[in-house]
Image (cartoon, rainbow, N blue to C red):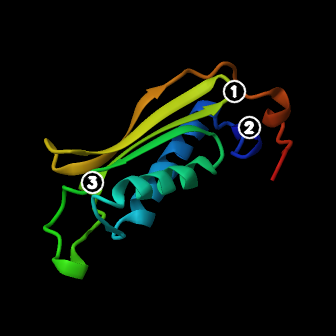
Amino acid sequence: MSARTVHARGVSPRDALLFEAGIKLGGVFHQYLGIPVTRRTAAGLARTIEHAVALQPYVRHVRVRIDPTRGGRPGTGRFAYRYLTPEMLDVRVTLADGPVVVRARLAHRPDLRYTLMRVTAASRDPAPLSSSRRRGRRRGP
């Protein structure tokens, strides 16, 4: 599926992938925060998140790292876990649509005291939209 068949005319494949990267990182950020995590379960949770993100369109690679030592103190006994917090996450995604590639990352920045989503690389569009798209013909969903 090409971004040209999904997004409005005038939206370049590169712009579409930049948008899609934000959706992927935002989804991880908002869907998984608050889930219980321990040192023993962190790697399995990271793989689960990777598999879920990899199902989505345009995703070519995803890597999730969870550092369960960050965040508040865990409870004790049966409550010896933390909740997943933004500071624990380091997520990298690579999206591609033909020759157009975008890489983005979600990671905590101690200097900002903030977990930041950012584009780390983006290729240039290989060509403008086709003339059939400029005339308003739609393809796909």
Q: Which residue is mark 3?
A: 88
For label 1, the crowd category at 10 Å Cα-Cα, with few meaning under 14, some 14 to 19 and many 20 or more, is: few
**Marks 2 and 1 close (CB-CB < 8 Å):** yes
Is 110 above or below relative to 119?
A: below
Q: Earlier in the sequence, mark 3 or mark 1?
A: 3
User: Circle 1 sits in a helix, a strand or a loop, which is it?
Assistant: loop
Element type where label 3 sits in the image = helix
Determine crowd level at label 3: few under 14, some 14-19, many 20+ residues with C-alpha closer than 10 A: many
The x and y percentages for residue 133 are: 80, 35
Q: Residue 61, image x and y in percent?
A: 54, 37
Disc 2 designates what residue?
Answer: 2
Question: Mark 2 or mark 3: which is in front?
Answer: 3
Residue 68 is situated, as x and y percent measured from the top left of the image, at 25, 57
Q: Which residue corresponds to the image point at 60% horizontal and 39% vertical from the top-left?
A: 16
- Type of amino acid under label 1: Gly
Query: Which residue sits at x=85%, y=44%?
Result: 139
Q: In the rendered image, which residue does mark 1 sit on?
A: 98
What residue type is disc 2 on?
Ser
Residue 10, compared with residue 51, is above or below; it is above
Image quadrant where residue 72 sits: bottom left
Does residue 62 sit above or below 38 in this rendering? above
Mark earlier in primary sequence (2, 3): 2
115 left or right, relative to 93: left
Q: Quadrant of residue 119?
A: top left
